[in-house]
Amino acid sequence: MPNTILVGAQWGDEGKGKIIDFLTDEADIVVRSQGGNNAGHTIVIGGEKYVLHLIPSGILRRSKTCVIGNGVVIDPVSLVGEIDGLLARGIKVGKNLLISDAAHLVLPYHRSLDELREVQKGTKKIGTTKRGIGPAYADKASRTGLRMADLMRPEVFTAKLTQRVKENNEILKSHGLAPLNGKKILQDYLAAGEKLRPFVTNTVIFLHRALELKQSLLFEGAQGTFLDIDHGTYPFVTSSNTTAGGASTGSGVPPHRIDSVLGVMKAYTTRVGEGPFATEDQGLSDTLHAMGREYGATTGRARRCGWFDAVSTRYSTMVNGIDKIAITNLDGLDGVETIHICVAYRLDGKVIDFPPTDSDDLARCEPVYIELPGWLKGTEKARKFSELPPKARTYVKKISELTGAKLSIVSIGPGRAQTIRL
């Protein structure tokens, strides 16, 4: 398998976890390079459901190595809980997991600040998961963050944490909030650090040695293109680079060692949280929610749903260098009689074929649709592309044409077997 970046081409929740799990059979190493435990990747194996937040989805495959890279922000206590949960279900977690010593830590004061800032925004809230991801990345950028390397040296970590808790407690108190218990935080995080110690290493060195051995790398993106801090619908974005470029900076693997970029997109569009969403459709949302679909793996929140947006996915193809696409959740449209695809926006009377940079402008955009007939047949039992209803094949081919990338995978259910490779 070529070294491949898998990236979400929409607003996250595209089904990346399942596609990663499917592709991991062909890869040697699976790498997470950005985000934190605000991600929620769901995999279903033999009827068993697994939801992973920090650990790459490749952990569910034997003989595969998983790497949490330097670009990820890690809550050590949460990560230990995730490891323990996997072990309790009989999943091996040992030498098959490596954690970058340069990865920054998410601490309790980050979560407190995250929630405080979201409350202060009122009606202009972002819709954050309140996991402390944004404040942790802010500390990283302001050079006040704590890293895994610090946690591995208890004396150093104690001194740095004590100072940071003191500083952040002053902020919390100034807003009338109770200060955090620094001693309890120190105790919990040092304990978590000892449990994580066997996994912590310089993952850049490991990955480059793997490249020398001609091992294949699969980069598991979290969130999606339009949640990217630079290229997303700012300010309704996450705090990391969710686009393909983030895989290099967040892992230490240079761009010229990447062979392919696979963009994952739903057969329709969803979004969690606030922000503009040109193709949002309440009727489609009601239909999907009534089917028990489209609830967040991390938050449990109902996702906002809308028609497929070819304007945004074309832009995703451009920004990420997507050469192949995987279309997921096609079965969600099995009962829809008429399907809409957005092929352009109308902004202030002018038709445009790209998403505006300004979120206020995007919020004023009206979708320009084409219509395709639905197939009104179940697709979940198809195992070959030829077994899909003809109108379903026409629909996914149209998505590929409008997006500008080759159709590579079609998913018609959560199970491994419900995946069609073209």
Image (tube, helix red, strand yellow):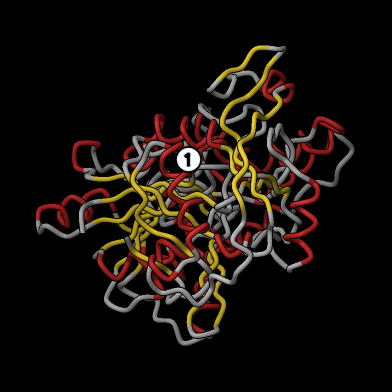
With respect to residue 305, does 42 lie above or below?
below
Q: Is 391 located above or below residue 365 in the figure?
A: below
Q: Which residue is mark 1?
A: 242
Residue type at mark 1: give it: Thr
Q: Residue at x 73, y 48 (%)?
A: 304
Residue positioned 71% across, 31% down in the render = 276
Vertical position of residue 279 compared to residue 31: above or below: above
User: Front-most of 238 and 303?
Assistant: 303
Label 1 sits on a secondary structure element that is loop
Quick check: 395 left or right of 119? left
Task: Count how many numbered circles sit on residues in the image.
Answer: 1
Name the residue rendered at 58%, 41% in the picture. Answer: 136
Name the quadrant of the C terminus. Answer: bottom left
Residue 339 locus on image (x, y percent): 64, 49
Q: Tell me the quarter of the picture where residue 113 sits.
A: top right
Q: Residue at x 24, y 65 (%)?
A: 28
